[in-house]
Amino acid sequence: MSRVSLTQYLIEQQRLHGHIPQELRLLIEIVARACKRIAIAVNKGALGDVLGTAGSENVQGEVQKKLDIIANEVLIEANEWGGHLAAMASEEMDSIYVVPNRYPQGEYLLLFDPLDGSSNIDVNVSIGTIFSVLRKVGHARGVAEEDFLQPGKQQAAAGYCVYGPQSMLVLTVGDGVAMFTLDRETGSWVLTQDEVKIPADTKEFAINMSNMRHWAPPVKRYIDECLAGEEGPRGKNFNMRWIASMVADVHRILTRGGIFMYPWDQREPDKPGKLRLMYEANPMAFLIEQAGGAAVNGSERIMDLHPTKLHERVAVMLGSKNEVERIQAYHREG
Ligand code: P6P
């Protein structure tokens, strides 16, 4: 594949499909540049005094790692002055961040989990940045949290950056999924896979098995059938992976198929799930669907859900289409 840069890809996509207006291209390029800075900070590890906890908690009541805060600050500083955004929302911030009056406001809203999987930082396992782009509804200056509460199917773009053996940026603007690898010698994001497609079937599931006794019956039924292997109702053996870093697990699924599940469980019955709808489930669902997969909360399509709170959580089952449809059928049977 001849080496195509992120900018060249976005310009050519705009020429072909017209889904990437100038402002959106600027937004994506700025987020990509911010992810490059985060990749450099992550790669420093102990050499950069970026490991360990920051001695604070986020809105979720989770202990913040130093890198959580660094990544959040990098994304805010990179995006606030460009004139393409009206406001931002982050897992690490209680409320939205409105672009300060000293800068022009734009038509987009940016949501992100600045560093997902941060419990893996200190043990050197892949982590990532997840982002989602919405259009600001209405054109008067001023933006409120309610403007963010749009269903995932309204997203203008979504993606993640996985900081692993390679740093890779994975992106959709609604015309399929493309993957870019960071060339550290030139500092540019280079197109390394286009038109990503997930196989409809799989033999690999990803779930935290230690929670098995807490699952609802449809999830237990699905996993029990996978574990029964070729002697069981599925007639084939399954493999299991669980990296405990959603970005890394989803990247594997986009690369070779599979099913990822973080379902509701009875430990906190009022909580629909662990993962957040607006800046984890929705962007990942957009990518998975654009690659031919499916993403549900059990019975419903994730991107159809109407959010009521910025940090609301959701059960997530996503990946190979035929597997997700099976899980959805089990939930509908009850
Ligand atoms: P558990 C990381 O904290 C995260 O939000 C996702 O990236 C990951 O899939 C999940 O939680 C892991 O959760 O309960 O297995 O540690």
Image (tube, rainbow, N blue to C red):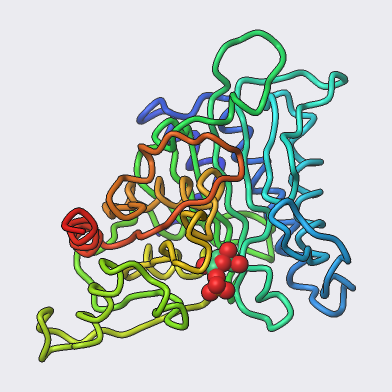
Q: Is residue 54 above or below residue 179?
A: below
Along the viewing direction, whichever of 141 and 291 lies nearer the viewer: 141
Q: Is residue 201 left or right of residue 54?
A: left
Residue that sits furthest to the bottom in the current view: 231
- Residue 329's image quarter? bottom left
Q: Residue at (56%, 41%) from the top-left corner? A: 7
- Coordinates of residue 301 in the picture (x, y in percent): 31, 45
Along the viewing direction, whichever of 100 and 180 lies nearer the viewer: 100
Q: Residue at (46%, 45%) from the top-left corner? A: 282
Q: Residue at (25%, 60%) from the top-left corner? A: 324
Q: Residue at (54%, 25%) from the top-left corner? A: 135
Along the viewing direction, whichever of 315 and 121 lies nearer the viewer: 315
Q: Is residue 144 above or below residue 261?
A: above
- Coordinates of residue 136 in the picture (x, y in percent): 58, 21
Can residue 257 be seen from the camera position used here? no
- Residue 169's image quarter? bottom right
Can residue 131 be seen from the camera position used here? yes
- Coordinates of residue 47 in the picture (x, y in percent): 87, 78
Q: Quadrant of ligand 1?
A: bottom right
